[in-house]
Image (cartoon, helix red, strand yellow):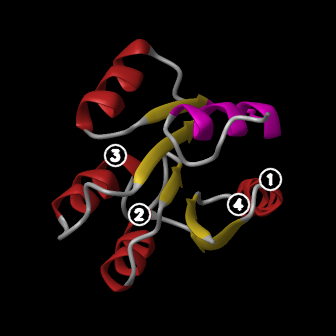
Amino acid sequence: MKTCLVVDDSSVIRKIASRILEDMNFRIVEAEDGAVALEICKRELPDAVLLDWNMPVMDGFEFMVHLRQLPGGDAPKVVFCTTENGIDHISKALHGGANEYIMKPFDKDIVAAKFQEVGLIAAPV
């Protein structure tokens, strides 16, 4: 079973994302900010990271930069999931190491489509 780290300071968003991803057969690990997420990744790298941008302590972009510097840190597929919809944020995320970008609000279809695009789940037959 693949693991997805859901990183968001909103417990509601983490819960919604977790339910969607559990339905897609992911084991879920949650973190409320980038610093907690980084500590988790130092112990065990997930297959995927669903990542918010704006969080206290360490934001999503800073977390991703640190993640990519860890041994094997280039392997997890990082999908930003944020309200930051400006082209500058999207471009910065994708050039900084993110694999995909989802706008909030999101639903199961959007998450599934993006996870298919980055090869985390198979397309429906």
Q: Secondary structure at mark 1?
A: helix
Comparing marks 4 and 1, which lies closer to the viewer?
Answer: 1
Picture layout, residue 38 above or below residue 15: below
The verdict on residue 36 being magenta is no
The verdict on residue 112 being magenta is yes
Q: CA distance from mark 3 to mark 1?
A: 23 Å
Return the x and y of residue 113 as percentages of the image width and height.
67, 31
Q: Amino acid at mark 4?
A: Arg
Whether residue 83 can be seen here = no
Return the x and y of residue 52 as percentages of the image width and height.
53, 47
Q: Secondary structure at mark 4?
A: helix
Q: Is residue 40 left or right of residue 7?
A: left
Q: Nearer the viewer, residue 101 or 125?
A: 125
Give the residues in magenta: 103-117
Per the image, the residue denoted by label 1 is 20
Q: Earlier in the sequence, mark 3 or mark 1?
A: 1
Return the x and y of residue 13 as percentages of the image width and height.
73, 53
Q: CA distance from mark 4 to mark 2?
A: 14 Å
Prevailing SS of the magenta stretch: helix
Residue 61: numbered disc: 3
Q: CA distance from mark 2 to mark 3?
A: 9 Å
